[in-house]
Image (tube, grey):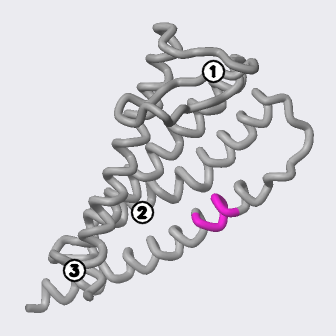
């Protein structure tokens, strides 16, 4: 299977990541809507929200404002993460691979992982009043992914210049 272009791996991953972004937005909207309208039950100091199509499945969490804020921040981050990832994959499924649009999307994704990710990480720790950083690997993975994407962006920038020069000579 080819990696780039129509009917490629990037084509299928585009749809998968776009569906993940849409589903996470729908899920966080449903959770916040249920909490706002009182469409939940409380059992053992935890809220339980039944999923509409799966009656035996519940979304559970402690009914505290800091928990709800943390869930919201994390879900919003991953919604944006999957949306930006799908935009990158959308540029990969095009006929021309090295474009300004691809470079711009890679830049947005790098910013998300290098700046927004760490801000949300520390904000969640502040909201949850956590003094330990046992989950620092989440921060490190975000930073590592951001740096890797910056390398990919540099490669795409170089490829765009070479492709543009080749188009001008033909």
Find the magenta span and give its range. Answer: 141-145
Callout 1 touching callout 3 (CB < 8 Å): no
Distance (Cα) linking label 3 and label 2: 19 Å
Residue with the mark numbered 2: 106
Residue 143 in magenta stretch: yes
| Quadrant placement of the N terminus | bottom left
Label 2 element class: helix
Q: Residue at x 26, y 80 (%)?
A: 4
| Quadrant placement of the C terminus | bottom left
Q: Main secondary structure of the magenta part?
A: helix
Circle nearer the N terminus (3, 2)? 2
Distance (Cα) linking label 1 and label 2: 38 Å
Residue sticking out furthest to the right: 131
Instruction: Give the crowd class for mark 3: few <14, some 14-19, many >=20 residues within 10 Å.
Output: few
Nearer the observer, 13 or 43: 43
Determine which quarter of the picture holds residue 17.
Answer: bottom left
Residue 51 screen position, x and y as percent? 43, 31
Residue 14 screen position, x and y as percent? 30, 62
Instruction: Give the crowd class for mark 1: few <14, some 14-19, many >=20 residues within 10 Å.
Output: some
Label 1 element class: strand
Determine which quarter of the picture holds residue 74.
Answer: top right
Residue 54 placement, left or right of 32: left
Q: Residue at x 57, y 72 (%)?
A: 148
Residue with the mark numbered 1: 47
Residue 47 in magenta stretch: no
Q: Residue at x 39, y 50 (%)?
A: 20
Residue with the mark numbered 3: 164
């Amino acid at each position: 299977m080819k990696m780039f272009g129509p009917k490629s791996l990037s084509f299928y991953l585009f749809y998968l990541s776009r569906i993940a972004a849409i589903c996470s937005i729908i899920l966080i909207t449903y959770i916040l809507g249920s909490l706002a309208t009182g469409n939940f039950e409380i059992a053992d100091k935890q809220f339980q929200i039944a999923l509409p199509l799966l009656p035996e499945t519940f979304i559970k969490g402690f009914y505290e404002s800091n928990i709800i804020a943390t869930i919201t921040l994390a879900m919003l981050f991953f919604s944006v993460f999957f949306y930006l990832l799908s935009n990158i994959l959308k540029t990969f499924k095009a006929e021309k691979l090295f474009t300004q649009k691809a470079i711009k999307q890679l830049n947005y994704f790098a910013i998300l992982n290098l700046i927004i990710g760490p801000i949300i990480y520390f904000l969640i720790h502040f909201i949850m009043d956590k003094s330990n950083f046992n989950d620092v690997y989440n921060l490190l993975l975000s930073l590592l992914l951001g740096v890797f994407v910056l390398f990919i962006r540099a490669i795409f920038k170089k490829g765009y210049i070479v492709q543009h020069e080749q188009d001008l000579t033909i």
